[in-house]
Amino acid sequence: MITLRPHEKLLYRATPRRAAAGRRTRRPAGQALRHAGRVFAAEALKQHRRSFGSKLVVFSMLIWPVMQLAATYYTVRPLAATPGIAERWPLAADPGLLLAFLATGTLGFTFFFSLVQSAWHFSFERVTGTLELLFLSPADRLVIVVANGFGALVQNAWLFTCFMIAAFTVLDVVHVAHPAMYAVVFLALLVPAIAWGAFLNSVLIFSRDSAFLYTLLDDPMWFAAGVRLPLFALPGWIRAAGSVLPLTGSLVVVRGALLSGQTAGELAPELAALAGLSALLFAAAVLALRLGEANAQRTGRLRLF
Protein backbone atom coordinates (compact mmCIF):
# COMPACT_ATOMS: atom_id res chain seq x y z
CA MET A 1 0.00 0.00 0.00
CA ILE A 2 1.35 3.42 -0.99
CA THR A 3 1.23 6.11 1.69
CA LEU A 4 0.87 9.65 0.37
CA ARG A 5 2.33 12.71 2.07
CA PRO A 6 0.00 15.70 2.66
CA HIS A 7 1.26 17.68 -0.36
CA GLU A 8 1.07 14.54 -2.52
CA LYS A 9 -2.55 14.00 -1.45
CA LEU A 10 -3.32 17.57 -2.50
CA LEU A 11 -1.84 17.00 -5.94
CA TYR A 12 -3.60 13.65 -6.22
CA ARG A 13 -6.95 15.24 -5.37
CA ALA A 14 -6.25 18.02 -7.89
CA THR A 15 -6.12 15.46 -10.72
CA PRO A 16 -9.31 13.61 -11.68
CA ARG A 17 -9.01 9.93 -12.43
CA ARG A 18 -8.56 8.56 -15.94
CA ALA A 19 -11.70 7.55 -17.79
CA ALA A 20 -9.92 4.74 -19.60
CA ALA A 21 -6.60 3.00 -19.15
CA GLY A 22 -3.75 4.86 -20.80
CA ARG A 23 -6.00 7.70 -22.08
CA ARG A 24 -6.87 11.13 -20.72
CA THR A 25 -10.37 12.49 -20.93
CA ARG A 26 -10.97 15.50 -23.16
CA ARG A 27 -12.24 18.47 -21.19
CA PRO A 28 -13.79 21.76 -22.30
CA ALA A 29 -11.35 24.65 -22.42
CA GLY A 30 -12.62 26.25 -19.22
CA GLN A 31 -12.54 23.00 -17.28
CA ALA A 32 -9.06 22.18 -18.58
CA LEU A 33 -7.84 25.60 -17.49
CA ARG A 34 -9.28 25.15 -13.98
CA HIS A 35 -7.73 21.69 -13.77
CA ALA A 36 -4.32 23.07 -14.80
CA GLY A 37 -4.68 25.84 -12.20
CA ARG A 38 -5.38 23.33 -9.43
CA VAL A 39 -2.39 21.20 -10.43
CA PHE A 40 -0.23 24.34 -10.61
CA ALA A 41 -1.28 25.44 -7.13
CA ALA A 42 -0.77 21.97 -5.65
CA GLU A 43 2.75 21.61 -7.08
CA ALA A 44 3.74 25.14 -6.02
CA LEU A 45 2.47 24.40 -2.49
CA LYS A 46 4.45 21.18 -2.43
CA GLN A 47 7.56 23.12 -3.44
CA HIS A 48 6.97 25.65 -0.66
CA ARG A 49 6.49 23.00 2.05
CA ARG A 50 9.59 21.13 0.93
CA SER A 51 11.85 24.19 0.84
CA PHE A 52 10.73 26.19 3.87
CA GLY A 53 11.41 24.05 6.88
CA SER A 54 12.91 26.87 8.95
CA LYS A 55 12.75 30.66 9.25
CA LEU A 56 16.50 30.74 8.59
CA VAL A 57 15.70 29.95 4.97
CA VAL A 58 14.15 33.42 4.62
CA PHE A 59 17.30 34.97 6.11
CA SER A 60 19.55 33.08 3.67
CA MET A 61 17.48 34.27 0.69
CA LEU A 62 18.79 37.79 1.33
CA ILE A 63 22.15 37.39 3.02
CA TRP A 64 23.81 35.17 0.43
CA PRO A 65 22.97 37.31 -2.64
CA VAL A 66 23.99 40.46 -0.74
CA MET A 67 27.31 38.92 0.30
CA GLN A 68 27.90 37.79 -3.28
CA LEU A 69 27.15 41.30 -4.53
CA ALA A 70 29.46 42.92 -1.98
CA ALA A 71 32.32 40.52 -2.76
CA THR A 72 31.96 41.18 -6.49
CA TYR A 73 31.78 44.94 -6.07
CA TYR A 74 34.92 45.21 -3.95
CA THR A 75 36.72 42.86 -6.33
CA VAL A 76 35.88 44.89 -9.42
CA ARG A 77 36.02 48.37 -7.82
CA PRO A 78 39.84 48.75 -8.06
CA LEU A 79 39.48 48.62 -11.85
CA ALA A 80 38.16 52.19 -11.69
CA ALA A 81 41.74 53.36 -11.10
CA THR A 82 42.95 51.75 -14.33
CA PRO A 83 44.00 54.41 -16.90
CA GLY A 84 41.56 54.64 -19.80
CA ILE A 85 38.86 52.54 -18.14
CA ALA A 86 36.28 55.31 -18.55
CA GLU A 87 36.64 55.19 -22.34
CA ARG A 88 36.21 51.43 -22.58
CA TRP A 89 33.71 50.91 -19.75
CA PRO A 90 32.12 54.19 -18.58
CA LEU A 91 30.13 52.47 -15.82
CA ALA A 92 33.31 51.45 -14.01
CA ALA A 93 34.27 55.09 -13.43
CA ASP A 94 31.09 55.75 -11.42
CA PRO A 95 30.78 53.76 -8.17
CA GLY A 96 27.00 54.04 -8.15
CA LEU A 97 26.58 52.87 -11.74
CA LEU A 98 29.10 50.09 -11.23
CA LEU A 99 27.15 48.86 -8.21
CA ALA A 100 23.91 49.05 -10.22
CA PHE A 101 25.50 47.04 -13.06
CA LEU A 102 26.63 44.33 -10.66
CA ALA A 103 23.33 44.41 -8.74
CA THR A 104 21.29 43.77 -11.90
CA GLY A 105 23.62 40.88 -12.69
CA THR A 106 23.20 39.43 -9.21
CA LEU A 107 19.43 39.81 -9.41
CA GLY A 108 19.29 38.03 -12.77
CA PHE A 109 21.57 35.26 -11.53
CA THR A 110 19.38 34.82 -8.43
CA PHE A 111 16.35 34.38 -10.69
CA PHE A 112 17.94 31.79 -12.95
CA PHE A 113 20.12 29.90 -10.50
CA SER A 114 17.21 29.38 -8.11
CA LEU A 115 15.67 27.35 -10.93
CA VAL A 116 18.87 25.33 -11.34
CA GLN A 117 18.67 24.48 -7.64
CA SER A 118 14.98 23.66 -7.94
CA ALA A 119 15.58 21.29 -10.86
CA TRP A 120 18.40 19.60 -8.96
CA HIS A 121 16.13 19.01 -5.96
CA PHE A 122 13.28 17.92 -8.23
CA SER A 123 15.48 15.12 -9.57
CA PHE A 124 15.68 13.68 -6.02
CA GLU A 125 11.98 12.85 -6.21
CA ARG A 126 12.93 9.75 -8.14
CA VAL A 127 14.54 8.46 -4.94
CA THR A 128 11.57 9.25 -2.69
CA GLY A 129 9.03 7.79 -5.12
CA THR A 130 7.10 11.05 -5.55
CA LEU A 131 8.01 11.25 -9.23
CA GLU A 132 6.40 7.90 -9.96
CA LEU A 133 3.18 9.10 -8.33
CA LEU A 134 3.21 12.24 -10.47
CA PHE A 135 3.59 10.21 -13.66
CA LEU A 136 0.82 7.82 -12.57
CA SER A 137 -1.58 10.75 -12.17
CA PRO A 138 -3.31 12.38 -15.17
CA ALA A 139 -1.81 15.77 -14.25
CA ASP A 140 -0.30 17.58 -17.22
CA ARG A 141 3.46 17.04 -17.13
CA LEU A 142 4.35 20.48 -18.44
CA VAL A 143 2.12 22.17 -15.85
CA ILE A 144 3.91 20.23 -13.10
CA VAL A 145 7.43 21.25 -14.17
CA VAL A 146 6.40 24.88 -14.80
CA ALA A 147 4.69 25.08 -11.41
CA ASN A 148 7.70 23.56 -9.67
CA GLY A 149 10.02 26.12 -11.24
CA PHE A 150 7.65 29.04 -10.68
CA GLY A 151 7.24 28.12 -7.01
CA ALA A 152 11.01 28.01 -6.55
CA LEU A 153 11.47 31.31 -8.37
CA VAL A 154 8.93 33.22 -6.29
CA GLN A 155 10.17 31.79 -3.00
CA ASN A 156 13.87 32.33 -3.64
CA ALA A 157 13.89 35.66 -5.46
CA TRP A 158 11.17 37.84 -3.91
CA LEU A 159 13.15 39.06 -0.90
CA PHE A 160 16.29 39.98 -2.82
CA THR A 161 14.12 41.64 -5.50
CA CYS A 162 12.54 43.86 -2.85
CA PHE A 163 16.00 44.68 -1.51
CA MET A 164 17.21 45.64 -5.00
CA ILE A 165 14.21 47.91 -5.59
CA ALA A 166 14.93 49.71 -2.31
CA ALA A 167 18.65 49.97 -3.13
CA PHE A 168 18.01 51.36 -6.62
CA THR A 169 15.63 53.93 -5.13
CA VAL A 170 18.23 55.08 -2.60
CA LEU A 171 21.10 55.18 -5.12
CA ASP A 172 18.95 56.97 -7.73
CA VAL A 173 20.75 55.25 -10.60
CA VAL A 174 17.71 53.97 -12.51
CA HIS A 175 16.63 56.04 -15.50
CA VAL A 176 13.88 54.55 -17.63
CA ALA A 177 12.51 56.02 -20.83
CA HIS A 178 8.92 55.28 -19.78
CA PRO A 179 7.30 53.76 -16.66
CA ALA A 180 6.04 50.88 -18.82
CA MET A 181 9.66 49.75 -19.17
CA TYR A 182 9.47 48.41 -15.62
CA ALA A 183 6.92 45.87 -16.89
CA VAL A 184 9.23 45.04 -19.80
CA VAL A 185 12.10 44.46 -17.37
CA PHE A 186 9.94 42.26 -15.15
CA LEU A 187 8.72 40.12 -18.05
CA ALA A 188 12.23 39.91 -19.53
CA LEU A 189 13.32 38.27 -16.29
CA LEU A 190 10.21 36.24 -15.46
CA VAL A 191 9.24 34.56 -18.74
CA PRO A 192 12.72 33.32 -19.76
CA ALA A 193 13.37 32.19 -16.18
CA ILE A 194 10.17 30.10 -16.11
CA ALA A 195 11.02 28.62 -19.52
CA TRP A 196 14.54 27.87 -18.26
CA GLY A 197 13.14 26.19 -15.15
CA ALA A 198 10.67 24.09 -17.14
CA PHE A 199 13.45 22.90 -19.44
CA LEU A 200 15.83 22.05 -16.59
CA ASN A 201 13.13 20.22 -14.64
CA SER A 202 12.21 18.19 -17.71
CA VAL A 203 15.83 17.21 -18.31
CA LEU A 204 17.09 16.61 -14.79
CA ILE A 205 14.26 14.32 -13.67
CA PHE A 206 15.41 11.87 -16.34
CA SER A 207 19.15 12.42 -15.83
CA ARG A 208 21.36 9.91 -14.04
CA ASP A 209 23.95 12.54 -13.05
CA SER A 210 22.10 15.72 -12.13
CA ALA A 211 25.01 16.91 -9.94
CA PHE A 212 27.17 17.33 -13.05
CA LEU A 213 24.63 19.64 -14.71
CA TYR A 214 24.18 21.54 -11.44
CA THR A 215 27.92 22.25 -11.28
CA LEU A 216 28.06 23.11 -14.98
CA LEU A 217 25.33 25.72 -14.59
CA ASP A 218 26.82 27.45 -11.54
CA ASP A 219 30.04 29.43 -12.12
CA PRO A 220 30.14 28.89 -15.91
CA MET A 221 26.68 30.46 -16.20
CA TRP A 222 27.48 33.68 -14.38
CA PHE A 223 30.80 33.97 -16.24
CA ALA A 224 29.46 33.42 -19.76
CA ALA A 225 26.25 35.41 -19.25
CA GLY A 226 28.03 38.62 -18.23
CA VAL A 227 26.75 38.69 -14.66
CA ARG A 228 29.87 40.33 -13.21
CA LEU A 229 31.75 41.47 -16.30
CA PRO A 230 30.56 43.28 -19.45
CA LEU A 231 30.16 41.03 -22.46
CA PHE A 232 32.64 43.01 -24.56
CA ALA A 233 35.40 42.07 -22.09
CA LEU A 234 34.92 38.34 -22.76
CA PRO A 235 36.56 36.39 -25.59
CA GLY A 236 34.43 35.80 -28.66
CA TRP A 237 33.97 32.08 -28.09
CA ILE A 238 32.72 32.69 -24.54
CA ARG A 239 30.27 35.32 -25.80
CA ALA A 240 29.04 32.80 -28.37
CA ALA A 241 28.54 30.17 -25.65
CA GLY A 242 26.77 32.67 -23.41
CA SER A 243 24.38 33.74 -26.17
CA VAL A 244 22.48 30.44 -25.85
CA LEU A 245 21.73 31.17 -22.17
CA PRO A 246 18.49 33.09 -21.55
CA LEU A 247 20.16 34.90 -18.65
CA THR A 248 22.44 36.70 -21.13
CA GLY A 249 19.55 38.18 -23.08
CA SER A 250 17.62 39.03 -19.92
CA LEU A 251 20.55 41.03 -18.53
CA VAL A 252 20.99 42.91 -21.80
CA VAL A 253 17.34 44.00 -21.66
CA VAL A 254 17.35 44.78 -17.92
CA ARG A 255 20.53 46.83 -18.05
CA GLY A 256 19.56 48.57 -21.26
CA ALA A 257 16.17 49.61 -19.88
CA LEU A 258 17.21 50.52 -16.33
CA LEU A 259 20.73 51.89 -16.69
CA SER A 260 20.85 53.20 -20.27
CA GLY A 261 17.27 54.44 -20.63
CA GLN A 262 16.60 52.46 -23.80
CA THR A 263 13.06 52.10 -25.10
CA ALA A 264 11.21 48.93 -26.07
CA GLY A 265 11.78 49.81 -29.71
CA GLU A 266 15.53 50.06 -29.22
CA LEU A 267 15.52 46.73 -27.36
CA ALA A 268 13.19 45.05 -29.87
CA PRO A 269 15.87 42.74 -31.38
CA GLU A 270 16.93 41.53 -27.92
CA LEU A 271 13.30 41.08 -26.81
CA ALA A 272 12.46 39.12 -29.97
CA ALA A 273 15.50 36.88 -29.50
CA LEU A 274 14.56 36.35 -25.85
CA ALA A 275 10.97 35.45 -26.76
CA GLY A 276 12.20 33.00 -29.41
CA LEU A 277 14.62 31.38 -27.00
CA SER A 278 11.91 31.06 -24.34
CA ALA A 279 9.56 29.39 -26.85
CA LEU A 280 12.37 27.03 -27.84
CA LEU A 281 12.99 26.10 -24.20
CA PHE A 282 9.29 25.36 -23.64
CA ALA A 283 9.23 23.20 -26.77
CA ALA A 284 12.38 21.37 -25.63
CA ALA A 285 10.75 20.79 -22.21
CA VAL A 286 7.69 19.22 -23.84
CA LEU A 287 9.88 17.02 -26.04
CA ALA A 288 12.05 15.89 -23.11
CA LEU A 289 8.96 15.00 -21.07
CA ARG A 290 7.45 12.97 -23.89
CA LEU A 291 10.69 11.15 -24.65
CA GLY A 292 11.37 10.47 -20.98
CA GLU A 293 7.88 9.19 -20.26
CA ALA A 294 7.85 7.01 -23.39
CA ASN A 295 11.19 5.54 -22.37
CA ALA A 296 9.90 4.91 -18.83
CA GLN A 297 6.84 3.10 -20.17
CA ARG A 298 9.05 0.97 -22.41
CA THR A 299 11.89 0.17 -19.97
CA GLY A 300 10.30 0.73 -16.55
CA ARG A 301 13.04 3.20 -15.57
CA LEU A 302 12.81 6.97 -15.13
CA ARG A 303 16.21 7.51 -16.71
CA LEU A 304 16.73 8.84 -20.20
CA PHE A 305 20.45 9.64 -20.12
Image (cartoon, rainbow, N blue to C red):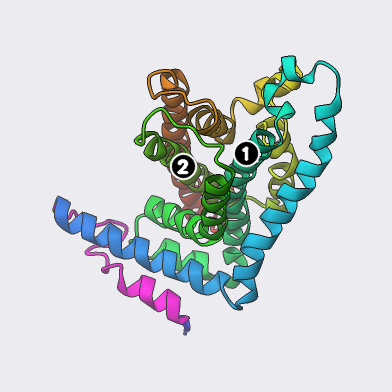
**Residue 87 placement: quadrant:** top right
Q: Which mark is residue 195?
A: 2
Decide: is 195 above or below 231: below
Residue at image position (68%, 52%) is: 210
Residue at image position (16%, 50%) is: 29
Q: Earlier in the sequence, mark 1 or mark 2?
A: 1
Asked if the residue under mark 2 is in contact with the one under mark 1, i.e. CB atoms within 8 Å, the reply is: no
Q: How many marks?
A: 2
Element marked by disc 1: helix
Relative depth, front residue between 100 and 239? 100
Q: Main secondary structure of the magenta part?
A: loop
Taking the magenta stretch, the answer to whether it contains residue 178 is no
Q: Which mark is residue 27?
A: none
Residue at image position (64%, 44%) is: 106
Decide: is 261 above or below 74: above
Kindly identify which residue carries mark 1: 100
**Residue 240 placement: quadrant:** top right
* Kind of residue sitting beneath label 2: Ala
Query: Is residue 82 something that shows in the picture?
Result: yes
Taking the magenta stretch, the answer to whether it contains residue 8 is yes
Relative depth, front residue between 148 and 171? 171
Q: Would you say 194 lies left or right of 12 here?
A: right
The answer for how far apart the CA atoms under marks 1 and 2 are is: 26 Å
In the image, the segment drawn in magenta is: 5-28
Element marked by disc 2: helix
Circle 1 Cα neighbour tier, 10 Å, few/some/many (<14 / 14–19 / ≥20): many
* Kind of residue sitting beneath label 1: Ala
Q: Nearer the viewer, mark 1 or mark 2?
A: 1
